[in-house]
Image (cartoon, helix red, strand yellow):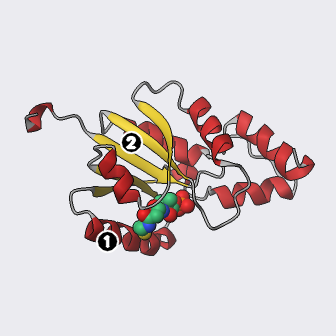
Amino acid sequence: MSERHRSIIAVYPGSFDPITNGHLDLVERGARLCDRLIVAVLGNESKQPLFTVEERMEMLREAVADYPNVEVDTFGGLLVDYARNKGATAILRGIRAISDYEYELQMALMNRRLCPEVETVFLMAGEAYSFVSSRMVKEVIRLGGNLAGLVPPSVEVRLRNRVLKGV
Ligand code: PNS
């Protein structure tokens, strides 16, 4: 296929435990930059997640249903192997504050070392979400706070049920 007709596939990887509006902002903007965006949930995490991979994928699928070029998947093993298998040429990641930079730089350089054909592309988090993280939304729910505007309403309901009622 000629370069001109090659479609651009990007992978947006993460734990997404759970998805926040910051993630969704990145999905929306990232989806404009490529032909196909695969949101890929890490499946073999060492840290204990609040939601199962299936639950996280379900929340993601609901949230990205309006974007025709966005799909949701799960992966294990090396991210670059997954990206290569999918024919992706880009990994999409968001950067909120300078504190994200070091971790993201290490990951991007390691991934480039492992697979130079796949480029990591960073988008700056939307300013309205630059303080939002999955870890913090879990804490806010646990302590009785309100997440309106920070996560999709259905995710807030699920968070409340899981964190406060254990269901
Ligand atoms: O949202 P997160 O938890 O910061 O996402 C981290 C993620 C999933 C992108 C990262 O842990 C990852 O890519 N893991 C797969 C294993 C891998 O490829 N490691 C080598 C590169 S550092």
**Relative vertical location of residue 93 with respect to residue 25 in this rendering, above or below:** below
Count of numbered circles in the view: 2
The disc labelled 1 sits on which kind of residue? Leu
Q: CA distance from mark 2 to mark 1?
A: 21 Å
Name the outermost residue toward the right.
165
Kind of element beneath mark 1: helix
The residue positioned farthest toward the left in the image shown: 2
Q: In this orientation, which residue lies closer to the viewer: 87 or 98? A: 87
Q: Is residue 91 left or right of residue 117?
A: right
Give the labeled residue for mark 2.
Answer: 30
User: Is 13 above or below relative to 65?
Assistant: below
Q: Residue at x 85, y 43 (%)?
A: 161
For the point 47% across and 43% down, the residue is 39
Q: Amino acid at mark 2?
A: Gly
The quadrant of the image that shows the C terminus is top right
Q: Position of residue 13 (x, y in %)?
A: 46, 52
Residue 154 in the figure: left or right of residue 6: right
Comes first in the chain, label 2 or label 1: 2
Q: Is residue 33 left or right of residue 165?
A: left
Residue matched to label 1: 109
Badge 2 crowding class, 10 Å Cα cut-off, few under 14, some 14 to 19, many 20 or more, is many
77 sits left or right of 148 in the view: left
Please state the horizontal and vertical placement of residue 141, each as a whole percent of the image.
81, 52
